[in-house]
Image (cartoon, helix red, strand yellow):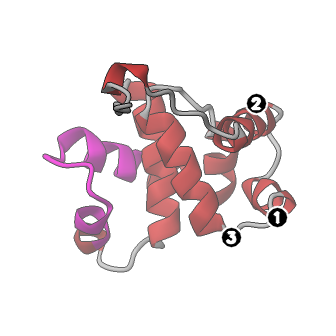
């Protein structure tokens, strides 16, 4: 008796739902305007990992309103400077932005502002 492998159309990929549970948790807590460091801490992750997870959410087309957090970490002039940069930049590369500002901003702050910018302008 000959056995055949299933055709690709017959394969079903099952996920554990962990990623969607984390995504939902992040979206809900951002909507509740909880401090990002508290959200990260509650999930046992550092800010870099939290920002990466948020980037995944925003880059997939879901908007996150993190204005409350951006206002905590950047003053109005800094926000305006970063907005102008991202409006005029040919790329949204963090490395390019870090290089452009030459130490004026922490990479984490630029990444957070970029999330705000993409949520408002880029989607």
Count residues near mark 3 (Cα–Cα under 10 Å), then give few for <14, some for 14-19, many for 20+: some
To which residue does mark 1 refer?
A: 41
Mark 1 touches mark 2? (CB < 8 Å): no
Whole-percent x and y of residue 122? 34, 29
Magenta stretch: residue 86 in it? yes
Q: Nearer the viewer, residue 6 or 64?
A: 6
Residue visible at 67% across and 35% down? 20
User: In whole angstroms, how far apart are the C-alphas of marks 3 and 2?
Assistant: 20 Å
Magenta stretch: residue 43 in it? no
Q: Nearer the viewer, residue 79 or 37?
A: 37
Q: Quadrant of the N terminus?
A: top left
When the figure is inspected, residue 53 is found, relative to residue 57, above or below; the finding is below
When the figure is inspected, residue 4 is found, relative to residue 69, above or below; the finding is above
Count residues near mark 1 (Cα–Cα under 10 Å), then give few for <14, some for 14-19, many for 20+: few
Residue visible at 23% across and 68% down? 100
To which residue does mark 3 refer?
A: 46
To which residue does mark 2 refer?
A: 31
Mark 3 touches mark 2? (CB < 8 Å): no
Q: Residue furthest bottom?
A: 103
Q: Quadrant of residue 50?
A: bottom right
């Amino acid at each position: 008796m000959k056995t055949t492998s299933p055709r690709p159309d017959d394969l079903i990929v099952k996920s554990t739902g962990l990623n969607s549970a984390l995504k939902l948790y992040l979206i809900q807590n951002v909507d509740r305007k909880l401090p990002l460091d508290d959200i990260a801490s509650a999930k046992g992750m550092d800010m870099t990992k939290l920002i990466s997870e948020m980037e995944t959410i925003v880059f997939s087309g879901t908007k996150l309103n993190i204005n409350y957090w951006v206002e905590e970490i950047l003053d109005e002039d800094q926000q305006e400077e970063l907005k102008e940069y991202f409006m005029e930049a040919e790329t949204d590369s963090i490395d390019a932005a870090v290089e452009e500002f030459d130490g004026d901003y922490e990479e984490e702050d630029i990444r957070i502002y970029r999330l705000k910018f993409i949520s408002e302008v880029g989607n």
